[in-house]
Amino acid sequence: MDALAASFPGSAVSRDESLAREFEQRLADCPKLAYRVALGVLHNPAEAEDVAQDAMLRAYRNFHRLRDRERFRGWLVRMAFRLALDRIRSKTRRERHEHDATRATIHAQPKADVENLVASREFERQVAQALDKLPEKLRIVMVLAAIEGYNTREVAKLAGLPEGTVKSRLFLARKKLAESLQCLVKNTPDR
Amino acid sequence: MSCEKYSGSLTDAALGELRAEREPELLAHTMECATCREALNHARQVRQFIDRGVESLVSGEPTPQFAVNLRRRIAQKAESPQSPWMAWAPVIAGALALAVVLTIMVAHRRVRSGLNPSVASAITPISTPPEAATASPASSQHSQRTEGTLGSEGTGRARPFTTALPEVIVPKGQLSAAAQLSAAINSGRVDGNQLVAAQQEYEKPLEVKLIEIAPMEIPALDTAAEKPANSIQF
């Protein structure tokens, strides 16, 4: 991404030189962040890339309106998250049917060994589906917490929420995911 | 019985959200109870899977093509910058809509006031000479309209006309006089400009001039001189 930042001509980024420089500084790592947030929602690299580009483009267009430049990352994250959700909503019914059919196939598979399970595509799909079922406000904190191991404070800053709220939402999100996924883990105790 | 008491706390403990004062108690129980110990381990394992699973979902880097495409799209944006007027487009559209609504309201009000039975309205071709009225179809149409309006005198009701010519509201009963005046102006017997000038003069506000009142001079009385000789004194 550093190459990306270096490749921007100042005049192309913005007419205002100082704004252009500020935006360029953020191009070093922010596209990756936007991409990962979109990937956490869409689970599709190509679509995530497209959404991340849209988010970056929108950020570029409205960069002059952002008064507090320190909030750029959070602003971009929320924008990417929203755009990714919009993309999901615009998917056709046919794709949803295909998705449901895939899920039914996964459920029918036998439980796997712990390490193999985590490494398997099926597990990844199951996690993705469980994540999709989460309410949006729980999903964004869960995705952000998973990106580069952000702690509660960093997630709060990115999501624009109080730390306490992030903590409780993370707990709720994990609890719901645990309920959805515990059937996959071997040696489930019968209580 | 005690297992039921702790079963609800196992997930909280696994997610690191159990209250600090309850944790030692739960851990002591799990040391004694194999089922709860197993359940706690399972819950921790699930949490680990979840975190690792979600991490795997969001791991990855955008392709090198990402940078190229983004640069191209931003460059395109820079080449075709959005007109600053476009930002004002909604405001302008709103103002235009408001202007249209106001115009309609004003026109409607004028029509309603024209329907007042105390006055009759007429559109008179004050400045249009009769030659011009026959020169073009539009003018002849106008003269027809004028006739139609004059014909409505008896009903005392106004008809709104869509015409560019001046509209004159004539009090009821004076319509024939107004028509005569109009005809006189059109024929050139009466100078319209003179009439307008006279009207303007008439409408001028009155000027109040201060009147200077000089003090009266009263001559001093000379009682001795003015006393008549034959005056009678009591």
Image: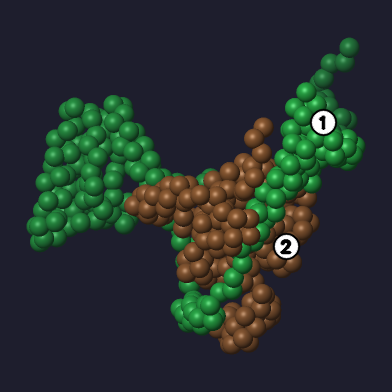
Seen at 55% across and 61% down, the residue is A120
Host chain of mark 1: B
Judged from the image, the secondary structure of the residue bearing numbered disc 1 is helix
Query: Does residue B128 appear in this view?
Result: yes
Q: Is residue B225 above or below residue B211?
A: above
Q: Is residue A58 left or right of residue A162?
A: left
Asked if residue B195 lies left or right of residue B209, the reply is left
Amino acid of disc 1: Glu
Q: Which chain is brown?
A: A
Residue that carries the numbered disc 2 in the rendered image: A149
Residue B226: mark in rendering: 1
x%, y% of residue B80?
46, 78
Q: Nearer the viewer, residue B94 or B181?
A: B94
Number of the front mark, 1 or 2: 2
Position of residue A27 measured from the top left corner of the image (x, y, whole percent): 64, 77
| Quadrant location, the C terminus of chain B | top right
State the green chain: B
Q: Is residue B131 left or right of residue B177?
A: left
Total count of labels? 2
Residue in view at x 66 percent, y 78 percent: A28
Q: Secondary structure at mark 2?
A: helix
In the image: residue A90, left or right of residue A69:
left
| Nearer the observer, B54 or B207 | B54
Chain to which the residue tagged by mark 2 belongs: A
Q: Which quarter of the picture shows residue B17?
A: top right
The residue lying at 17 percent from left, 57 percent from top is B129
Q: Could you classify mark 1 by the number of other residues whose Cα lies within 10 Å: few (under 14), some (14-19), or many (20 or more)?
A: few
Tags 1 and 2 in contact by the CB under 8 Å rule?
no
Disc 1 to disc 2, how far (Cα)? 129 Å
User: Which one is in front, B72 or B117?
Assistant: B72
